[in-house]
Amino acid sequence: MHRPQFEVAQIIDRFGQQFVEQYQPNSFMVRTLDALQKCRTSALGGHKDFCDVCGEQRISYNSCGNRHCPKCQGARQALWVEDRMNDALDVKYFHIVFTVPEELNQICLLDSNLFYKSLFECVWSVLLQFGYTHYCVESGAICVLHTWGQNLSLHPHIHCIVPSAGLALAGNMKRITKKDKYLYPVLMLSPAFRSILLRKLKLQLRQSNQLQKYQSLLDYVWEKSWVVHCEPPFGNPQQIVKYLGQYSHRVAISNHRIKNIDDSGVTFFYKDYRDNSRIKPTKLSGVEFLRRFCMHILPKRFVKIRYYGILSSKQKDRVKSLLIKKPETKVTETRQERIVRLTGFNSRICPVCKTGFMHTIELLPKIRAPTNVLYATKTLSC
C-alpha cells in the first residue's frame, strides 16, 4: 500500500497548539499527541543503513509504538491474528456487537475509564448468563472495545467473538450444535444488556451523588430499543479470527482516509451506513478534528482486548486438553522473521536495487531539544 500524502501527525503539528490552548486536555492526551507527532521523525532517533550491492544509503527513523498511532499497528495486528489462529478451537465462532445509545455518551465522558470497564463487565455478564441458561455451559469470548463512529463521533461498542462450545457443569467440554444462524436469541440479548448496564450505571451515579442529575436520561434510554447485532457463524475459526483482526488494532482514523489538510481544516472520507455504506467526504476544523480524535484516546493502561471464560489465559490450557484440536507446531522464528512472513515486507531489502540487503552503519540519537510545543503549552497553561 502506498504511503498516504496526509497524516494525523501533520494535523497535530498544524493545529495541536491551538487545540491545547482552547480545550486544555489532560497531560496523558498531550503526551499521546506528542508521540504521534514525533513518530518516524528525527526526534525519536533512528539509524543509517547501507546496501551491500548498490551502495544506496538510507536513513530510517524510529516509530513511537503508541497504540493510538495510525502508523504503528500493522505488525502488531498481523502477529496478534496469527497468535489467535494458533489458539482457535475447532468449533464455529459467532460475531456479536454490543452498542449503547448515543444519549449515554455524556455519562461516558464523566469517567471514560469507569464507563468502559462497566461496559466490558456487563457484556461478559450477559454472555455468561445466556451460555448457562440456553446451553448449561460456561462459554467464552474475545471482546474488543471500539469507541468511534465513521465521522470520529463518540460511539462506544464492543465486538465479541463467541465459540459454540463451553465447559459443562460436569467439567467436560460441550460443543453447541446450532441449526439456527444465531447463537443466542437476538431479541432477548438487547433487553438483558440494557437492564444490567443501566443498573450498574445507576449505582455508580448514586455513589458519586449525580444520580438526580441524570435520572431523567436513564429513564429515557430505558424506554429505547437497544441494538445488539449478531451475525451467522463463519466457515472456520481462521476466517472469524481474521475478521476480528480487522477490529483488534484499529485506531480512530487511518491516514489513508485523510483527503486534505489546509488552514480551514481537515477533509476526510467516511462510510455513510445510512446511505448503503457509500464513501463520502466530510470536513472539520483542525481543532474540532483533534477534539474528536482525543475522545478516543483510551485511559492510561486501559486494556481494550479482553479474554473471558474458556478463552481466558486461565482456562486455555485446560480447554485444549478437553477439546480435540489440530496439533500445534512450535515456531522458532524471530519476531522480525514472523513480520516479514505475515506482511510480505522486508525492511532489510534495498528499496533501490531490490537484491541487496541494508546493513546498519550508524545509529542516530534522539533529539532532545527544542522542547515540545504541545507539552510546553500545556505546562504554561497549568
Image (spheres, rainbow, N blue to C red):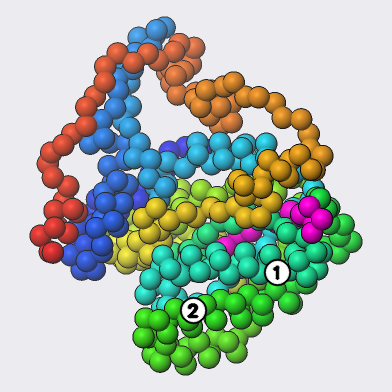
Residue 377 left/right relative to 43: left
Query: What's the distance in space between the residues labelled 1 and 2, CA to CA?
Result: 19 Å
Residue 372 sits above or below residue 181 on the image: above
> Residue at horizontal 47%, vertical 92%?
216
Task: Please name the residue that numbered disc 1 is placed on.
Answer: 129
Q: Nearer the viewer, residue 260 or 132?
A: 132
Lateral position of residue 160 relative to residue 279, left or right: right
**Residue at far front of view:** 170
Q: Secondary structure at mark 1?
A: helix
Q: Position of residue 100 (x, y in %)?
A: 55, 74
* Percent x, y of residue 56: 35, 14
- Whether residue 345 appears in this view of the structure is no
Q: Is residue 169 magenta?
A: yes
Is residue 168 part of the magenta span, yes or no?
A: yes
Say what amino acid the circle numbered 1 marks.
Gln
Element type at marker 2?
A: helix
Residue 200 located left or right of residue 36: right
Residue at position x 47%, y 42% in the image = 73
Q: Is residue 5 left or right of residue 170?
A: left
The image quarter in which residue 20 lies: bottom left
> How many neighbours does mark 1 have within 10 angstroms: few (below 14), some (14-19), or many (20 or more)?
some
Residue for badge 2: 201
Amino acid type assigned to the residue bearing label 2 in the image: Leu
Which stretch appears magenta? 157-171
Circles 1 and 2: CB distance less than 8 Å? no
Residue 281 % position (x, y)? 46, 62
Give whichever of discs 1 and 2 has the lower sequence position: 1
Q: Looking at this view, is 88 or 187 the one in front? A: 88
Residue 274 seen in the figure: yes
